[in-house]
């Protein structure tokens, strides 16, 4: 399976991360987390690792001063930006593995809305309309490996997939059992709406 864009929204924040483990993601939602932090803790218990990582890069200059970096790197006259750039390139520290914004912000990673612009773009890309029988198929194509959006505020799980995956309400499915797939078992409560686009 390819990499899927996961978007999780709570009252405070909207986080976007690329991953592939749909089953553990939905299993974490099945426990009805109220916040992204709750979700992350549940995910860690189920999958053995956190879904979101803050990385281990200290904040400069709050946690690590530029003067300390200048001394360590032997860059006494360089600008703050040059020192910080050198430090990021040469250190073993990692940044967080997700992007964050306020909850209702539209981003380029969101599921593309089915608009006249999408239809016009599709017609321009494929005037004969042979590759994509419908504009919605073209929209799925634009999503590459798929997008999953879970809104903890409304208990709504929306996803669009070019056929790479489906999100069942119960896991493991009969196919999972038949083929011996190792999945995280869950039952997504009825209060959660699943919308396949």
Image (tube, rainbow, N blue to C red):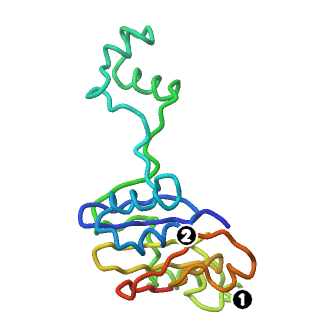
Q: Which residue is mark 1?
A: 130
The image position of residue 4, as x and y in percent, is: 56, 66
Work out whether residue 102 or residue 165 is closer to the camera in this orientation and state it.
165
Q: Is residue 144 visible?
A: no
Q: Position of residue 17 (x, y in %)?
A: 47, 58
**Location of residue 85 with respect to 98 vertically, above or below:** above
* Numbered circles on residues, count: 2
Q: Residue at x 71, y 88 (%)?
A: 130
Q: Residue at x 69, y 89 (%)?
A: 128
Regarding mark 1 in the picture, which secondary structure is present there?
A: loop
Can you tell which quarter of the image residue 39 is in?
A: bottom left
Crowding around mark 2 (Cα neighbors within 10 Å: few <14, some 14 to 19, many 20+) is: some
Identify the residue under disc 2. Answer: 22
Answer with left or right where residue 79 lies relative to residue 159: left
Q: Residue furthest bottom?
A: 133
Above or below 15: residue 141: below
Secondary structure of the residue carrying tag 2 is helix
């Amino acid at each position: 399976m390819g990499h899927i864009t996961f978007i999780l929204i709570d009252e405070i924040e909207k986080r976007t991360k690329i991953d592939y483990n749909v089953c553990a993601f939905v299993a974490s939602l099945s426990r009805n987390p109220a916040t992204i932090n709750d979700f992350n803790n549940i995910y860690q218990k189920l999958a053995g690792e956190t879904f979101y990582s803050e990385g281990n890069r200290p904040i400069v200059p709050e946690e690590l001063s530029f003067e300390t970096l200048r001394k360590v790197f032997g860059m006494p006259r360089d600008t703050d930006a040059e020192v910080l750039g050198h430090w990021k390139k040469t250190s073993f520290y990692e940044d967080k593995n997700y992007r964050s914004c306020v909850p209702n912000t539209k981003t380029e990673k969101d599921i593309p809305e089915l608009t006249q612009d999408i239809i016009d773009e599709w017609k321009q890309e494929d005037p004969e309309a042979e590759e994509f029988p419908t504009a919605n198929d073209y929209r799925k194509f634009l999503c590459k490996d798929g997008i999953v959006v879970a809104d903890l505020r409304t208990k709504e799980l929306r996803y669009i997939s070019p056929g790479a995956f489906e999100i069942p309400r119960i896991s493991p499915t009969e196919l999972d059992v038949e083929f011996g797939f190792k999945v995280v078992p869950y039952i997504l409560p009825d209060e959660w709406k699943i919308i396949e686009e």
